[in-house]
Image (cartoon, rainbow, N blue to C red):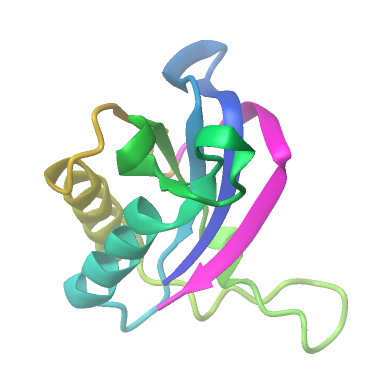
Amino acid sequence: MRLLLQKVTRASVSVDQKKVGEIAKGYLLFLGVIEGDTNEQADKLAEKVVNLRLFDGEGGKINDKSLLDTGGEALVVSQFTLAGDLKKGNRPDYTEAASPEVGRELYEYFIEKLKSLGVIKVEAGEFGAYMKVELVNDGPVTLVLER
């Protein structure tokens, strides 16, 4: 499971020019499910995300507070291209990506896990759809996490 996390001041995702998800301060999470990924990996990844200390604390202390500490929000967008392999040639190979059925199941599971861990607002894109994502990256802070 691969996740690209961007700390944002705001983000939204649209399908067919209709906004389907929108958040204020928090994390924009692009999630790629790899063949063989499990619920246990999704659990660990979600726990890592909600506990990462990427928000400043009192007195400007850097990286002092987590998403849970700040009441931050999360926008999760499925992105199978995170499973892409560019070792050979210039065309990505997506054979490592999970099947759409497995990908959807783990994507939805991950979203529910974030909610169960206490993230107050969790929004999502539309699995398998062509989406437009808008964001204001805060920092900028962008991290890649794998489980």
Which residue ends up furthest to the left in the rendered image? Answer: 116
Res. 124 in view: no
> x%, y% of residue 48?
36, 64
Left or right: residue 5 versus residue 115 is: right
Residues drawn in magenta: 129-147
Q: How many marks?
A: 0
Question: Most extreme residue toward the front, as rendered?
Answer: 59
Residue 83 included in the magenta stretch of the image:
no
The secondary structure making up most of the magenta span is: strand
Identify the residue at horizontal 31%, vertical 78% (top origin).
37
Q: In this view of the protein, can residue 28 be seen by the observer?
A: yes
Task: Give left or right: position of 79 versus 139.
Answer: left
Image quadrant of residue 136?
top right
- On the image, the x and y values in percent for residue 141 come to 68, 48
88, above or below 13, in the image: below
Q: Quadrant of the C terminus?
A: bottom left
* Left or right, residue 146 beside residue 59: left
Residue located farthest toward the top when viewing the structure as drawn: 18
| Residue name at image x 50 percent, y 26 percent | 25
Q: Residue at x 28, y 75 (%)?
A: 41
Any magenta on residue 136? yes
